Image (cartoon, grey):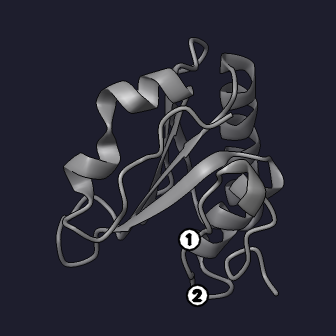
């Protein structure tokens, strides 16, 4: 099974990742976030609903250091895979880092900041569950 089809962290409260077309930028992002142990990974389909991107992926890191490391590693992996330039916003503070990869926009948060902004609720269009609060 691929990371997009299974959830190896089922017992620790991390949601199963959504399905993504193999080989796509979206699949690469989901795989890298799982590899880097991002928590509560949620993907919101924006295609046909917004012109900013096709997918928005929201995930959490346990600390500002982990959020920054996930963002930098994800940006490097996207570039290495040939998916074009990547913009990073929110470093070095790393409470909330935006990774703009064109067709996929990734928001990485510390859990407290994620709960405060609750982007899933704002952008879900009824498709994505609300973010779980208090997961470790």
The residue that mark 2 highlights is 21
Q: Mark 1 or mark 2, which has the lower sequence index?
A: 2
Q: Quadrant of residue 70?
A: top right
Does 17 appear above or below 91? below
Separation (CA) of disc 1 from disc 2 = 7 Å
Q: Residue at x 73, y 66 (%)?
A: 31
Q: Is residue 77 left or right of residue 50?
A: right
Mark 2 surroundings within 10 Å by alpha-carbon count, few (fewer than 14), some (14 through 19), many (20 or more): few
Residue 96 visible: no
Extreme-top residue of the structure = 93
Q: Is residue 107 left or right of residue 72?
A: left
Q: Residue at x 35, y 70 (%)?
A: 54
Mark 1 surroundings within 10 Å by alpha-carbon count, few (fewer than 14), some (14 through 19), many (20 or more): many
The answer to whether the residue labelled 1 contacts the one labelled 2, judged by CB atoms less than 8 Å apart, is yes
The residue that mark 1 highlights is 26
Point out residue 105 in the picture as x, y percentages from the top left corner: 44, 53
Numbered disc 1: secondary structure: helix
Q: Residue at x 57, y 81 (%)?
A: 20
Point out residue 4 in the picture as x, y percentages from the top left corner: 67, 77
Q: Quadrant of residue 56?
A: bottom left
Does 65 appear above or below 132? above
Numbered disc 2: secondary structure: loop
């Amino acid at each position: 099974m691929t990371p997009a089809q299974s959830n190896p962290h089922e017992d620790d409260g991390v949601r199963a990742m959504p399905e993504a077309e193999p080989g796509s930028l979206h699949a690469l992002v989901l795989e890298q976030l799982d590899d880097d142990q991002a928590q509560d990974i949620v993907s919101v389909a924006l295609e046909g609903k917004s012109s900013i991107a096709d997918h928005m992926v929201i995930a959490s890191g346990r600390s500002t250091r982990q959020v920054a490391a996930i963002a930098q590693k994800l940006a490097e992996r996207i570039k290495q895979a040939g998916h074009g330039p990547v913009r990073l916003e929110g470093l070095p503070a790393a409470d909330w880092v935006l990774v703009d990869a064109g067709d996929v926009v990734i928001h990485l948060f510390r859990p407290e900041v994620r709960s405060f902004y609750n982007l899933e609720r704002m952008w879900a269009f009824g498709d994505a569950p609300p973010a779980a609060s208090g997961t470790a």
